Structure formats: C-alpha cells, structure tokens
Image: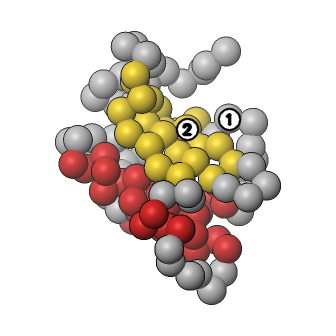
Amino acid sequence: MIKNLGTIKRPRLTVHKSNKNIAAQLIDDVNNVVLTGVSTLAPEIKKKKFKRPLERSRQLGKILATKAKKKKIETVVFDRGRFKYHGNIKEVTEGAREGGLKF
C-alpha cells in the first residue's frame, strides 16, 4: 500500500537499492506513469570512477534532479520504501536537494 501518492505537479520520488546498484524514479500515481528515472547503470554514472561508494549515490540524485528540471518538476514526495533513511538512500536525496528538488 502506498502512503505517499504522487501527482503530475508533485510526483513521488522512489529509491530502490540492491547489493550492487541503486535506482531512483519520479512516478505520477494518478496516471500510473513513470516520468523519469535513473540508475547506477546509466552511462553518465557508470563510466565515472568515484573515491567513495556514497559519492555515486549523490551523483545519481543530482542527475535525477537535472532530468526533473527539464520536465519542469520542482517539488516531490519522497518514498524510501522498505529502506532505512541512511547511507545510499540519504545520499540520493541529498544529491537531489543539491540539484534543486524540494521535498
């Protein structure tokens, strides 16, 4: 059950992580559409070398924010899912905030 519903003006930012990769998406729950998304398998992240693993997550958040800005999205509802708010999940949101998204 989804507690935070996203709309076209304020979509839901979901973050999913596995043992190796992280993915973040902006979802419009009213129309059941994924507006944009990015993962660590994207070429702009995969080709870079990071000193710390958490830097990769922060960069993912920044790239998601720039994609959202191109679609004229400024505010989002955050949905961390079953994951605790620390480590990679926190870094993705901090990167999105640095990129200009408001929560």
Q: Quadrant of the N terminus?
A: top right
**Marks 2/1: CA–CA distance:** 7 Å
CB atoms of marks 2 and 1 within 8 Å: yes
The residue that appears at 34% across and 41% down in the rendered structure is: 75
Q: Quadrant of the C terminus?
A: top left
Percent across and percent down for residue 77 are 46, 35
- View extreme (right): residue: 19
Q: Residue at x 21, y 48 (%)?
A: 70
Residue 63 lies in quadrant: bottom left
Colour mode of the rendering: secondary structure
Say which element carries label 1.
loop
Query: Eyeballing the image, is 1 above or below 16?
Result: above
Residue 37 in the image, given as x and y percentages of width and height: 44, 43
Q: Residue at left 43%, top 16%?
A: 32
- What residue does disc 2 label? 14
**Label 1 is placed on what type of residue?**
Gly
| Residue found at the far bottom of this picture | 51
Q: Which residue is mark 1?
A: 81
Q: Amino acid at mark 2?
A: Thr
Whether residue 93 is visible: no
Secondary element type, mark 2: strand
Is the residue 5 above or below the residue 96 in the image?
above
Query: Taking 83 as reference, is 50 left or right?
Result: left
Looking at the image, is mark 2 or mark 1 earlier in the sequence?
2
Q: Residue 44 vs residue 50: left or right?
A: left
